């Protein structure tokens, strides 16, 4: 699954366009490397998103195309 879609489905970022812009701006890293929106997310990847002066780090536990809002938190674990 594409990185921008994963960020939206997992609700780490609310909108896919915002996720895409964050990737283009270089604010999203996967396993320590800057990642593009088209990066293929796999279980075990560590995603870090820079929001201003704060950073969110999450490990991918599950990849699914659609998820209910209540189950979105099960797709990742904050590190």
Image (tube, rainbow, N blue to C red):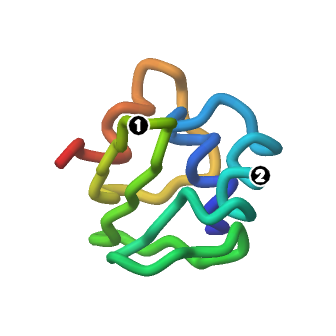
Question: In this rendering, is residue 47 above or below 67?
Answer: below
Residue 69 — which label?
none
Residue at the image position 50 percent from the left and 40 percent from the top = 10
Answer few, some or many: residues within 10 Å of disc 1's Cα (few below 14, many 20 plus, some between 14 and 19): few
Q: Which residue is identified by label 1?
A: 53
Q: Residue furthest right?
A: 17
Q: Residue furthest top?
A: 70
Residue at the image position 65 percent from the left and 29 percent from the top = 14
Q: Position of residue 30 (x, y in %)?
A: 42, 71
Relative to 79, 36 lies left or right: right
Residue at the image position 73 percent from the left and 34 percent from the top = 15
- The kind of secondary structure element at disc 1 is loop
Question: In this rendering, is residue 17 above or below 15?
Answer: below
Q: Which residue is identified by label 2?
A: 21
Question: In this rendering, is residue 39 above or below 26?
Answer: below
Image quarter hosting the N terminus = bottom right
Q: Position of residue 69 (x, y in %)?
A: 52, 21
Q: Position of residue 47 (x, y in %)?
A: 39, 60
> Of the residues under marks 1 and 2, which one precedes in the sequence?
2
**Between marks 1 and 2 in the image, the one whose residue lies nearer the viewer:** 1
Q: Between marks 1 and 2, how big is the CA–CA gap? A: 17 Å
- The kind of secondary structure element at disc 2 is helix
- The picture quadrant where one finds residue 72 is top left
Relative to 1, 12 lies left or right: left
Q: Position of residue 77 (x, y in %)?
A: 23, 45
Answer few, some or many: residues within 10 Å of disc 2's Cα (few below 14, many 20 plus, some between 14 and 19): some
């Amino acid at each position: 699954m594409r990185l921008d879609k994963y960020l939206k489905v997992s609700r780490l970022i609310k909108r896919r366009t915002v996720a895409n812009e964050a990737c283009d701006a270089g604010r999203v890293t996967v396993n320590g490397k800057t990642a593009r929106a088209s990066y293929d997310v796999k279980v075990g990847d560590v995603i870090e998103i820079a929001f201003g002066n704060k950073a969110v780090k999450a490990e991918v536990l599950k990849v699914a195309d659609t998820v209910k809002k209540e189950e979105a938190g099960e797709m990742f674990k904050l590190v």
